[in-house]
Image: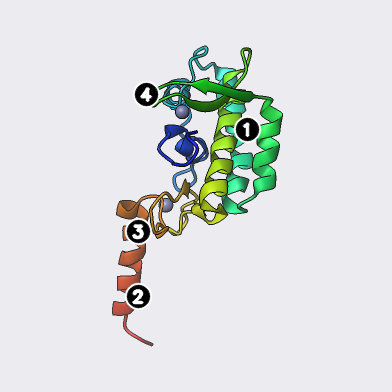
Amino acid sequence: MRFGDYKDPVTTLAEDVVNSYRHSVGHDDLTRPLLDDMARARGWRGARATARDVAAVRALRPELREVFEARSVTAANATLAAARLAPELVRHDDLPWHLHLGRADATLPEWVAGNAAFALLAVVEQGGADRLHRCAGPDCHAVFVDLSRNQSRRFCSPAVCGNRVHVAAHRARKAPRE
Ligand SMILES: [Zn+2]
Ligand SMILES: [Zn+2]
């Protein structure tokens, strides 16, 4: 996390983890390659994801979902504490030296849990808890961090969920009255 801005890709790690289970279609997208990509894109340089890592990260989703839905700093602090990581200065993806959390013998799920929780806490600290959202789309359980300047975002994807809401509203307006 780079203090003072939201440019670090670790900012969206928590939402990617939570949204890797898609409630709308009842499908779990989290595979070893996806988890590996997800973590490496945020600076993880440890071992490749195992089946056990995938199971542990799946189990982490309800904790992280709680942070978004209840805007719970307590939940994020608990997840962060359980990961037992410490600050370390890192460089990845052409970003200058900045702080992440780590530990020499950290497992991939610990690293993901600690860094995802830490990034959400940094968002709350710098931007406020009302930047954490669950999508307003019907039956969509996706969560996201609203990084827009005017904090106007309501949907995980304006093109998908935003559009579904507009179509439904349009139909409701056109429906004949009883
Ligand atoms: Zn970073
Ligand atoms: Zn949505």
Q: Is mark 1 within 8 Å of ligand 2?
A: no
The numbered mark, 2 or 1, whose residue comes first in the sequence reads 1
For disc 4, the neighbor class at 10 Å (few under 14, some 14 to 19, many from 20) is: few
> Disc 2 marks which residue?
172
Tell me what residue is drawn at x 56 percent, y 48 percent.
Answer: 124
**Dot 4: what SS?**
loop
Q: Where in the figure is residue 144, as x and y percent of width and height? A: 47, 47
- Residue 110 seen anywhere in this rendered image of the structure: yes
Q: Where in the figure is residue 176, as x and y percent of width and height? A: 31, 83
Q: CA distance from mark 1 to mark 3?
A: 29 Å
Q: CA distance from mark 1 to mark 4?
A: 28 Å
- Residue 27 seen anywhere in this rendered image of the structure: no
Q: Where in the figure is residue 27, as x and y percent of width and height? A: 47, 38
Left or right of residue 43: residue 173: left
Q: Are marks 3 and 4 in contact (CB under 8 Å)?
A: no
Mark 4: amino acid: Asp
Q: Where in the figure is residue 15, as x and y percent of width and height? A: 49, 41
* Camera-nearest label, 3 or 4: 4
The numbered mark, 1 or 4, whose residue comes first in the sequence reads 1
> Disc 4 marks which residue?
93
Q: Is mark 4 within 8 Å of ligand 1?
A: yes
> Disc 3 marks which residue?
162
Left or right of residue 148: residue 105: right
For disc 1, the neighbor class at 10 Å (few under 14, some 14 to 19, many from 20) is: few
5 is higher (above) or lower (below) than 161: above
The numbered mark, 4 or 2, whose residue comes first in the sequence reads 4
Tell me what residue is drawn at x 32 percent, y 78 percent.
Answer: 173
Q: Are marks 2 and 1 in contact (CB under 8 Å)?
A: no
